[in-house]
Image: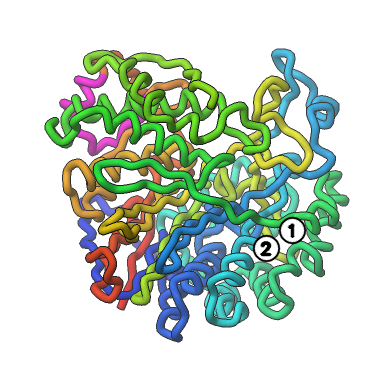
Amino acid sequence: MTHFDWHNPYPSTRTPVFARNVVSTSHPLAAQAGLRMLWRGGNAIDAAIAAAAAITVVEPVSCGLGSDAFALVWDGARLHGLNASGTAPAAWSLDYFRKRYGEQGGVARRPMRGWDTVTVPGVIAGWEALHAKFGSLPFADLMAPAIDIAERGYAVSPIVARKWNAAIAELREQPGFSAAFMPGGRAPEVGEHLRLPGHARSLRMLAEQGPRAFYEGEIAERIAAFSRACDGAMTLEDLRGYQPQWVEPIAKDYRGYTVHEIGPNGQGIAALIALGILGQFDLASLPRDGVESQHLQIEAMKLAFADVYRYVADPRSMELSPAEMLDDAYLKSRARLIDPHRATHFGFGMPRAGGTIYLSAADEQGRMISFIQSNYMGFGSGVVVPDMGISLQNRGYGFSMDPASPNVVGPGKRPFHTIIPAFLTRERQGRRQAVMSFGVMGGDMQPQGHVQTLVRMLDYGQQPQAACDAPRWKVNRDFSLDVEPTLDAGCVRELVARGHVIQSIEDPYMDFGSGQFIWRLEEGNAERGYVAASDSRRDGLAAGY
């Protein structure tokens, strides 16, 4: 194998991609898998499923066949939302975790990894639902590129290799992990050729038997048997009972456009709250990269998170509706809490009653899809079904153990979710037109990435690739800030002077997010084509023809 120093010390500028058919993902081989479907006469949804399958192979540090997923699909006339996040096993309750892990501070402890973080994986059912409603090619054809890559192998890319190596110390002892993801007893190196035969086996079974095999057939039986062997809670009945949900997206107007997100149990509402607050300020009159604009965005994001962490849960358990949380009068009152010269630690308000990958695809017939799937923390739970390559997410860690929380763990519930696809539309002459499918992966960074990139495009007119590459900040759970080294040093000093606490948090999976953006060049005319961007923070590619 060639031995280079794979670190590039020089800035590298990506240019936007223009094409009538586009796939944008965080890995080039996944983008090419999607593009192959478009070349064969498939549509954007076919392309997205093929790319999603391929990326479980080439970027397993972020997602796998045991992931969850969400999607927003523009069918050429209207927007559809899909929630394919998993539900808790029937055995899960506060008592279940208290008996297994004890208490801390009067509440049950919860593990971060292992079987007791695994909710029913939703991604395969999500692929099935998307294909049934919108797909045009046979499902088996969509699995073919991923099968080929897994069987023949691929060269591991730089950022994937770095994240892979960072996960080893914590996950190597989890059931099945070492056998699947530590060939030779270590993480693969950059450029190393890697085959994933177990993963290929599962993909072939999905192609030949159909995606329901994951929930009712041989694959389901293998998952349930491994759970029993490891004293896990997941049963065959839990798998059989799972179905994704078609949902109505939630939305908020901003600068003449409408921003769409998937509603709770996801955190997309955080981006809408922040944008609703920022809509009360004239950001365009402030310097784009100056402290005044950045401070307002940060404070709006903090206000949004204060409400989201208090109220968002499985919608069946929420005290408030998304409409109440997005009420214009309420958001105006929240905006008034912002001191333009000083950082504030906000509490939640009270409205009046009344490891992730993101990809996008668009075709010349006008269909567009915003799709995200994730194992949550890197490889997720660390649990991998033997000889199947199925790495299982750890979304159960998103539940609360506080009995007073609407997000408290319970059988069949969906936990608070960080992964959120997004979509932008605009109404023209009484008709709603698609403008952009977009998303930014990376835990709590996701709604923050949505807000920062949209502000750059809609308030400051920056083209998608520039908005994507621009330096970012990240609000942490304690309201401290992380900032990228490329953020203007003068701006950082002024943020500190205003009371912001800059804190460097070592986070090898989420960092400052990674986005994909596909913007329609002419609203209402898909044949005019698209301009696409892929984040330079990953190994990604926007490919089109």
Residue 388 within the segment the image draws in magenta: no
Residue depicted at x 52% and y 65%:
52
Q: Is residue 414 left or right of residue 76?
A: right
Q: Mark 2 — residue?
A: 389
Asked if disc 1 and disc 2 are in contact, CB closer than 8 Å, the reply is yes
Instruction: Please state the extent of the stretch shown in magenta in the rendering.
Output: 481-495
Q: Mark 1 — residue?
A: 385
Looking at the picture, how far across and down is residue 269, in whole percent? 46, 38
Looking at the picture, how far across and down is residue 425, in whole percent? 34, 54
Identity, as a three-letter code, of the amino acid under mark 2: Gly
| Residue 143 or residue 171, whichever sits in front | 143
| Residue 117 or residue 239, whichever sits in front | 239
> From where the camera sits, is residue 504 visible?
no
Looking at the picture, how far across and down is residue 106, in whole percent? 74, 14
Label 1 crowd (10 A; few <14 / some 14-19 / many >=20): many
| Residue 244 or residue 488, whichever sits in front | 244
Residue 485 within the segment the image draws in magenta: yes
Q: Is residue 310 left or right of residue 481?
A: right
Looking at the picture, how far across and down is residue 516, in whole percent? 36, 56
In which quadrant will I find the N terminus?
bottom left
Identity, as a three-letter code, of the amino acid under mark 1: Val
> From where the camera sits, is residue 103 visible?
yes
Instruction: Classify residue 220 by image quadrant.
Output: bottom right
Instruction: Classify residue 123 by image quadrant.
Output: bottom right
Residue depicted at x 33% and y 29%:
277
In which quadrant will I find the C terminus?
bottom left
Colour theme: rainbow
For this orientation, the residue located farthest to the bottom is 40
Residue depicted at x 24% and y 21%:
495
